[in-house]
């Protein structure tokens, strides 16, 4: 049976069903519900901008974007965004999608904490950032009707979400703090750990190996 939320149809395909099963098995309820909302918000935002997006690719981008925070898929030596992007790329290629399709989703997940840049790329890349910015940062909520917002949250509630997602970020990155340099993610580590030593871009330039 086809599922529809806030006018957005969840594609009834084998790829989508298997993506849902993979994400639900790896993520806890808070991250899974957040990821479904990211797909829905992102699709609504793309529509509001008058752009078309491949629904399967948008779905995988939303569902997999935080898999790098999970115990099953996180690594110790790269940004959590890249962990999720790698899982999505391999999943899509294994399910018959082209390298170009899989790469667009890889970029969407890898860049979803990098403001602005994804919005200048393909819709299948931009849709992830649009969804994340809506659900986590509350950006551009005015582009989504009150009724659509109510339907999405009714389908996937967000109890205490602000604190829950911050804690999830921290738990997923605390063991690889060096990967947060140059991103907003170091704000999260500094919030939870007052002793967290931030790298400073200016200091790196001034103290590097090049002589004056």
Image (tube, helix red, strand yellow):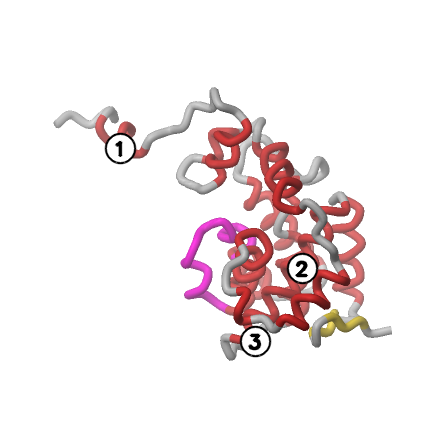
- First in residue order: circle 1 vs circle 2: 2
- Which quadrant does the C terminus fall into? top left
- First in residue order: circle 3 vs circle 2: 2
Location of residue 38 in the rendering, given as x and y in whole percent from the top left corner: 63, 59
Give the magenta-colored segment's residue range: 108-122
Residue lying furthest front: 146
Which mark is nearer the camera, 1 or 2?
2
User: Which residue bears the numbered disc 1?
Assistant: 202
Examine the structure image and report whether residue 82 is included in the region drawn in magenta: no
Name the image quarter holding residue 115.
bottom left
| Residue at x 67% of width, y 59% of height | 37
| Residue at x 58% of width, y 31% of height | 76
| Residue at x 59% of width, y 60% of height | 102
| Residue at x 53% of width, y 56% of height | 133
Does residue 25 lie above or below 9 as drawn? above
Residue lying furthest top: 195
Compared across the picture, whether 44 is left or right of 197 comes to right
Taking depth in this image into account, of 133 and 140 the one nearest to the observer is: 140
User: Which residue bears the numbered disc 2?
Assistant: 37
Circles 3, 1 touching at the beta carbon (< 8 Å): no
How far apart are the two marked residues, 1 and 2, measured between alpha carbons?
Answer: 38 Å
**Residue 47, numbered circle:** 3
Compared across the picture, whether 4 is left or right of 188 comes to right
- Which quadrant does the N terminus fall into? bottom right
How far apart are the two marked residues, 3 and 2, measured between alpha carbons?
Answer: 15 Å
Q: Residues within 10 Å of mark 1 (few under 14, many from 20)?
A: few
- First in residue order: circle 3 vs circle 1: 3
Q: Residues within 10 Å of mark 3 (few under 14, many from 20)?
A: some
Name the image quarter holding residue 13.
bottom right
């Amino acid at each position: 049976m086809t599922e529809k939320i806030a006018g957005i149809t969840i594609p009834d395909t084998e790829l989508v069903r298997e993506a849902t099963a993979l994400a639900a098995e790896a993520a806890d309820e808070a991250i899974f519900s957040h990821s479904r909302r990211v797909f829905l918000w992102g699709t609504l935002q793309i529509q509001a901008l008058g752009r078309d997006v491949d629904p399967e690719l948008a779905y995988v981008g939303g569902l997999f974007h935080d898999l790098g925070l999970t115990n099953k898929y996180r690594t110790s030596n790269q940004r959590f965004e890249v962990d999720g992007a790698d899982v999505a790329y391999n999943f899509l290629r294994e399910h018959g999608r082209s390298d170009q399709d899989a790469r667009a989703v890889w970029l969407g997940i890898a860049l979803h904490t990098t403001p602005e840049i994804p919005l200048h790329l393909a819709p299948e890349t931009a849709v992830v950032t649009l969804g994340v910015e809506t659900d986590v940062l509350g950006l551009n909520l005015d582009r989504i009707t009150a009724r659509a917002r109510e339907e999405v949250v009714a389908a996937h509630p967000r109890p205490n979400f602000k604190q829950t997602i911050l804690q999830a970020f921290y738990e997923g990155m605390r063991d690889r703090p060096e990967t947060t340099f140059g991103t907003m993610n170091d704000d999260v580590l500094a919030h939870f750990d007052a002793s967290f030593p931030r790298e400073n871009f200016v200091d790196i330039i001034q103290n590097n190996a090049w002589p004056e």
